[in-house]
Image (tube, rainbow, N blue to C red):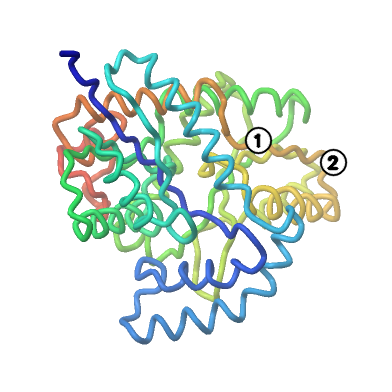
Amino acid sequence: MTERTEKLAVVLFNLGGPDSLAAVRPFLFNLFNDAAIIGAPQPVRWLLARFISGRRAPVARAIYEKIGGKSPLLELTRQQAAALEQAVGQTGIAAETRCFIAMRYWHPLTEETVAAVKAWGPDRIVLLPLYPQYAGPTTGSSLRAWEEEARRAGLRTPTKTLCCWPSEAGMIAAQADLLSAALAEAGPHARVLFSAHGLPQAVIDKGDPYQAQIERSAAAVVAALGRSDLDWRISYQSRVGPMRWLGPSTDDEIRRAGEEGKALVVLPIAFVSEHSETLVELDLEYGHLAKTCGVPRYVRVPALGCHPAFIGGLAGLVRRALASDRSPCSHLDGRLCTRDRTACPHSGPSLEG
């Protein structure tokens, strides 16, 4: 009798995006109805989500009209999933591997993916958020949703979780490679902006490690590039609402570069796939701003996509998660965050002291 091959399910998490213009408002409702985004209790949060999504939907639909009437994120994540399935097999993991996709705010939603994973019947599961840097509103929200839906569905398969991988070697090598090509296009004296999606400052003040991990990622890319003379800065985009957000903002840094006559290379340090924040905000809106502000050259670094070093890095993350005694674990297994980052989910001793 032939021995059955072990089955390994790798679940990739991302925020998701509307797959049609009609889906924009329900997508926004799901986003703002998340307690990680709006902390008000129900039914207040439901009412706020309904109001905000209705108010923002026309603006958001106009954004998606510029990129074909829908988000490209699901299709791009499917490409990454297919590439990762092949790459995991090359790491020596003796298992039939299938990658599943769980989107937080649009299909395939978490409950759909839990059902699909349970139906496939894996022997082990690895949860791999496609957010290199941990933040409560992204990684934390996605993993909590998985835990709730898995418990509800009775999915009890042994599971390992990656909480963060801000300086994973393959990802950093891919970023450095893409940045090097962009710098060659922009000129030797261009300034690099590592642009990350913003968060309210209050989230960071409560101990979220996102900002520290963004800084870790940017420093690692600069080190990999090997240019001690590189002019680089970190900035934050996509601010929403009147509250204080992480700064400096990317648009303010673009204006500064224009005043100083500096060419700019903008690298989306927190995004692994193209979507509205890169294709519309960075390319169209900030590209136009750069032109009107007198930036002599504006070059945007592509998102990681299926860059071979990046996909290889993801496969290495799967292997390390399976070998780790901890769940969740970082890409270095130990806790990356300092103890003042109290929202870090890793319970182990800090590698940062």
Judged from the image, the secondary structure of the residue bearing numbered disc 1 is loop
Q: Nearer the viewer, residue 237 or 322?
A: 322
| Residue positioned 28% across, 28% down in the render | 332
Judged from the image, the secondary structure of the residue bearing numbered disc 2 is loop
* Residue 39 image point, x, y percent: 35, 74
| Residue positioned 58% across, 72% down in the render | 25
Residue under numbered circle 2: 296
| Residue positioned 40% across, 35% down in the render | 99
Image quarter where the C terminus lies is top left
Q: Nearer the viewer, residue 66 or 201?
A: 66
CA neighbours of label 2 inside 10 A, class few (<14), some (14 to 19), many (20+): some
Going by the numbered disc 2, the residue's amino acid type is Pro
CA neighbours of label 1 inside 10 A, class few (<14), some (14 to 19), many (20+): some
| Residue positioned 46% across, 36% down in the render | 217
From this view, report whether residue 277 is shown above or below residue 158: below
* Residue 239 image point, x, y percent: 57, 64
Residue under numbered circle 1: 302
